[in-house]
Amino acid sequence: MSSAVGLLANGDFAAALGPLRSAAGPDAAPATMLNLAIAEDRAGDRDRARQVMRQVAIRLPDWDEPVLRLAESFRMAGETADAEQAYRDVLALNPHRTEAMAALAALLLLRGEAPEAQTLLWRCCLRQPDNAEVWNGLGLAQASLHENEKALTAFRHAARLTPDCVDYTLNIARTTSDPIGELQHQTEIAAQQPLNPIPQVARSLLLERLDRRNEAIDALEAAATLAPDDDQVLGLLAGLLIRAARPKQAEAVLRQLCDRRPEDPQPLNDLAATLMRLHRHAEAARILQDLLDRFGPRVSVLCNLANATTCLGQQEEGVALARQALTMAPDSVLARRTLGNNLPYQDGTTGTALLAAMQACSDVLPRPAPATPAAAHRDRDPGRHLTVGLLSGSLRSHPVGWLTVAGIETLDPDAFSIIALSQNTAEDDPICRRYQAVARQWIEIAGVADADLARSIGDLDILIDLGGYGDSGRISACAYRLAPVQIKWVGMQCHTSGLAEMDWFLTDRWETPDGFECFYSERLLRMPDGYVCYTPPPHAPDVTLLPALRNGFVTFGCFNNLAKITPRVIETWARILRRVPDSRLVLKTHQLGDPPTATALKASFAAHGIDTTRIECRGSSGHRAFMGQYGDIDLVLDPFPYSGGLTTCEALWMGVPTLTLPGEIFASRHSASHMSNAGLADWVVESTDAYVETAIARAADLPKLAALRGRLREQVRRSPLCDAPRFGRNLGQALRTAWQAWCAEA
């Protein structure tokens, strides 16, 4: 028996099973039976193990050990409610059992019950004053109660007890209210202990808090050099590189982690997510599917695979995967936002269905309790100067940037001040510099929790979300009511946010015609022209002559994300190609740089009788080259139900009109808005049959198409789509309208 106990102590549970089963007879001691149950539980036979634990507990009702082991079995299986009750049962038998107090406190912290957790952890600290882990737990409880000075004391005590633990020092760096002073302290330690990686890790976090991200990366790379076998340091470095928009470097670090930990699904999942940021969706999907095959369904893996699958043009499958994740975890914000992000790409998604999905996502978001009042202390003067916050991870050369920066720049500075709440600031980006020039204050929010953001940003009058539920979006922070007036604008603005705290939705009469109000949880704030202002890039090439005149055939094109190209789109485009002899179709997007993906797309056209030599697939390129390739296109065929947005504006600037079929949801009407705003409402049709017939008619009249191409850039330049001063006045009036409505609600 002693050898079996030794095997248990060493974690070799499978090897301990043999001798324990031999010793476990009808008259075996309770301790022997309990050891057998522990071994069986860790070896995977949970039902049998729990049955034995309960039997031992019945035989010795005053012994707390079997109940503690049962609680641990529940906890390790993720059955948190049962684990919590079992830990309470342990403490009913033995109020001083510190393992139960600490474990119960950890579970309570996970569901936001910090006061009770703090009480339990204080008791643990009194009984085990040299236990660094319980001091760290106490600090976490106090931090969640916003008792930061007390938390800092607890974290420092834990770090003194166990100075080689990275987590304790990181918690100090996260909690301190004096990051500059703590940075100096950690820098001094690093100088005194040049071979110690821990102060470098702490320096990295502090430098990031101080918006010195490049220096933060240098510090973590130094830590990784000092501790080349420390997977935690590598993981931190990968995360920082992702936040710094350096996915190629992050990929290299994550591959190191995957090589070291081939049986750990987390680095592989993170690698797949990083590959998606690099637009390598097919490669990511293969990794994710392998993860599911090897480790079974996991919510985060299913959600990543849903996104990758939709991005490969398999919208039905992507939505099905998101629903599978939601079935596993109905209260998961990740699963609900994934479903909401994928539904707009699926044929047949109605405005009503998308509203319900987004409201269900809103329902599971964390919120302050009780709800924070909507800035009742503010001066409700309807005409006063207003402070406007921009919440986004895309204040740079990005669709958000190209479609909003001119409007923000031309707001009346006597009436509005701008505060940027930026995630992943791109300091060397020209659009970012334009935002920085107009912002009164620039706050980097990467790594700042939603609740902390709500407490730290000061007094905003209006908050404009420019990220939604996108990859770097922070719309969840709006559930904490960052401003008395909150408005959804560009940035994953595919339909209603569904967010209970989002007051207004910035739109126009083409995006949301009369009668569409029922599809939105927000009030509609309609602009008199379009809802965006396009900023053409200065590097855009000149408009070329109509390519059909030199080619002798018409070339249709679509430069939109493959996620938007549904089976119904392919069928419709095939109808057009069959009716326009010798015509070609050029498809260009990141995903088509993957040869198997391009081959599969061409096969979809072949299934409709189209010779694949008529389909040209092009991968990604630099932005100037991307714009220049519109020189090969005679007219654009817009996808549906998710239409083009920025791509439609770019095509217009290059002299190429877009034929579009709007639907019920906001995402389906972007091109309809841009085309109408540019004076081309006759390119907006109401049915697939009209789409086909209009494409054929426009392709047949090359002189008219050539004449339009020749004048289109100037027409767009003079239109409201690019009239920044006009848009700025309209935007200012819309913001004032929203503010006045709030003032009137007093």
Image: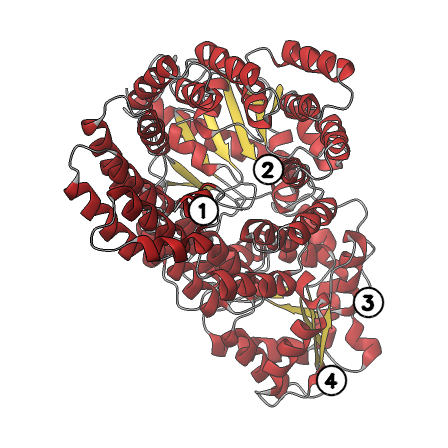
What's the residue at 47%, 21% (across, down)?
A: 136
What's the residue at 61%, 80% (across, down)?
A: 696
Where in the figure is residue 100, as x and y percent of width and height? 31, 30
Residue closer to the observer: 506 or 56: 56
Mark 3 and mark 4 lie on one chain; the one further toward the N terminus is 3
Q: Residue under circle 1?
A: 3
Where is 160 relative to 651, above or below? above
Mark 3 and mark 2 lie on one chain; the one further toward the N terminus is 2
Which kind of residue does numbered mark 2 sit on?
Gly
Where is 335 relative to 80, above or below? below
Mark 1 and mark 3 lie on one chain; the one further toward the N terminus is 1
Tell which tag, 3 or 2, sits nearer the viewer: 2
Q: Residue under circle 2?
A: 393
Q: Residue under circle 3?
A: 545
Question: CA separation, marks 1 and 3?
Answer: 86 Å
Question: CA separation, marks 4 and 2?
Answer: 40 Å
Instruction: Please state if 686 lies on the left or on the right of 215 as rendered.
Output: left
Tell which tag, 1 or 4, sits nearer the viewer: 1
Residue closer to the observer: 629 or 199: 199
What's the residue at 68%, 57% (across, down)?
A: 652
Where in the figure is residue 395, as x and y percent of width and height? 63, 36
- Callout 1–callout 3 Cβ contact below 8 Å: no
Mark 4 and mark 2 lie on one chain; the one further toward the N terminus is 2
